Amino acid sequence: MELSITVIIVAVTTLVSLLAEANQQIKQQLIFYPPAISRNHQWYRFITCGLIHGDFGHLFFNMLSMYLFGRFVEEGFNGLFGDQGKWMYLFLYVSALFVSLMPTYTKHKDDPHYMSLGASGAVSAIVFAGLMLVPTLGIYLFFIPIPIPGFIFAPLYLLFSFMMERKGGDNINHSAHIWGALYGVLFMVIASKSVDYPLLQNMVHEIGEYIRSKGWL
């Protein structure tokens, strides 16, 4: 049985994260450290930092989100783009690691005290790509026992991330979350046009049907 791209990403990321947790030298070689990029041209850090995480909780939450969303996004890509679907899906994930961190790099490229790690930016891209495909998908949060439709969750997530980015002080790179999510949306809009798939029209229709079914209008 062929392994999905999602399962491979989750497995590789989990393995490398656990190895890096046991060996701090590995973590230091892979972590996103802007001065090492600007001064030593270690561009690979944009990608490798997505293979390591701060602790087991960070790893678990990212990989659980990746597994739950990635499976149906990968399936959606296979349906939309045929034989190229799995490679476009992989390209979205890998390129999102780079794109989501570019604003961070621009801001901290000469900051010797700044480091970042984790796949959150790429996972955000996958989540928002999924919400573009199924905007009414129910999102469960740990502290809310009922699902939140994706088209409501998405702007709330961006607003929360923006507020926390402005506030700062929590050692979480909210900027990567924001730019990863926006990149996922942009990627889906452009990619869907390449195969003449009416993504935005379908989103509007599905959201409208959902709102009418709930009697909100």
Image: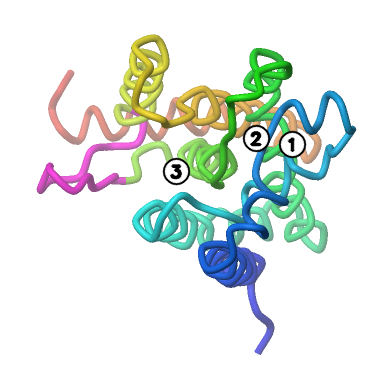
What predominant SS class does the magenta segment belong to?
strand
Residue 191 position (above or below residue 93): above
Give the residue displayed 46% in from the left and 49% down from the top: 54
In the image: residue 157, left or right of residue 185: left
Residue 52, horizontal then vertical, whole percent: 57, 54
Q: Amino acid at mark 2?
A: Met
Q: Which residue is mark 1?
A: 191
Does residue 149 show up magenta in the picture? yes
Front residue (pair 92, 82): 92
Does residue 183 show up magenta in the picture? no
Marks 3/1: CA–CA distance:
16 Å
Quarter in which the C terminus is drawn: top left
Q: Amino acid at mark 3?
A: Val
Residue 183, horizontal then vertical, whole percent: 63, 28
Front residue (pair 56, 155): 56
Q: Considering the numbered disc 3 on the image, is that residue within a helix, a strand or a loop?
A: loop
Residue 176, horizontal then vertical, whole percent: 55, 29
Residue range of the region highlighted in magenta in the rendering: 138-151
Q: Which residue is mark 3?
A: 134
Marks 3/2: CA–CA distance:
12 Å
Q: Considering the numbered disc 2 on the image, is that residue within a helix, a strand or a loop?
A: helix
In the image: residue 96, left or right of residue 18: right
Residue 96 position (above or below residue 105): below
Residue 163, horizontal then vertical, whole percent: 34, 13
Asked if marks 1 and 2 touch (Cβ < 8 Å), the reply is yes
Which comes sooner in the sequence, label 3 or label 1? 3
Crowd rating for badge 3 (residues with CA inside 10 Å; few <14, some 14–19, many 20+): many
Q: Which residue is mark 2?
A: 188
Q: Amino acid at mark 1?
A: Ala
